[in-house]
Amino acid sequence: MASDPWKQAASVADLGNLMADWLEGRLGGWTPNYLDDRPDEETNHLIPVLAAACRAGFVTTNSQPGCAPERGYDGRMWRQRAFVEGWIADGALLARIRAEAKQAGMTVVAHGPSSRGGGCIPLTDADGEIQMAAGDYPGHRRLMNSEWRGIGRHATNQLRHATYLTLIDPVWGRDDRLWRALANAIR
C-alpha cells in the first residue's frame, strides 16, 4: 500500500505541490479541506493560476469564479464574487500578493496565528440571501483541524506560523481582475 502523500508533507511548500497536483488531476483520492475528489467544474478555467499559486507557496484551500446574476436550479437569481483563500508561510510572497491585489482593487483579509473573528463578506447570494461568505475567522487551530486533518507533523508546525489569506473581488460577477493580480504576484 502506497504511503499517504499528505501525511508525508514536511512543509507548506510540500502541501502546495500536492494541492497543485490534485488541482491538475495528477493526485487523486482524498484531499484535505475539499469535500470532493476533484475541483468543481466552475473552477476549471482557474486551475492554471490556482496550481501556479500553490507551487509558488500560496496553498489555496477554497476559491470560486465571479458569476454574473443568473437564474439558478431553484428559480432564484444567483450571483457570486471571485475569491480565493489559503495559507502562506513566505512573508515576501505574502507582501507581493497583498500589493498586487490591493493595486487591482481587491479586498484583502489576512489572519496571523493569533487572529480571531472578523467581518462577514458575502461571496454568493440567491435573491439577496447570503449562501456563502468569507471573513469570519475561527482561529488557526480550529481552521487547521477542519482543513488539514491528516497531514504531516512538520507541515502542521509550519502552518501554525503561516498567514491565512483571503482575496475577494468586491464587484459581483467580475471574473478577470483577481486572477490576473494573483498571476502577476507569483511570477
Image: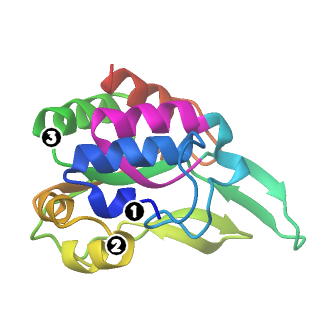
Residue occupying image coordinates x 90% and y 70%: 75
Amino acid type at image mark 2: Gly
Splitting the image into 4 quarters, where does residue 105 fall? top left
Which callout, 1 or 3, points to the residue nearer the camera?
1
Coloring applied to the structure: rainbow
Answer few, some or many: residues within 10 Å of disc 2's Cα (few below 14, many 20 plus, some between 14 and 19): some
Q: Is residue 99 left or right of residue 24?
A: left
Q: Is residue 187 above or below residue 55?
A: above
Residue bearing mark 2: 150
Splitting the image into 4 quarters, where does residue 118 fall? bottom left
Residue bearing mark 3: 90
Whether residue 50 appears in magenta in the rendering, the answer is yes
Element marked by disc 1? loop
Q: Is residue 148 left or right of residue 133?
A: left
Residue 127 visible: yes
Q: Position of residue 57 (x, y in %)?
A: 27, 39
Question: In the rendered structure, which disc, 2 or 1, sits on the residue that comes first in sequence?
Answer: 1
Amino acid type at image mark 1: Asp
Residue 67 visible: no
Question: In the rendered structure, which disc, 3 or 2, sits on the residue that comes first in sequence?
Answer: 3
Q: Nearer the viewer, residue 187 or 123?
A: 187
Alpha-carbon span between mark 2 and mark 1: 9 Å
Label placed on residue 113: none
- The stretch of residues the image draws in magenta is 46-64
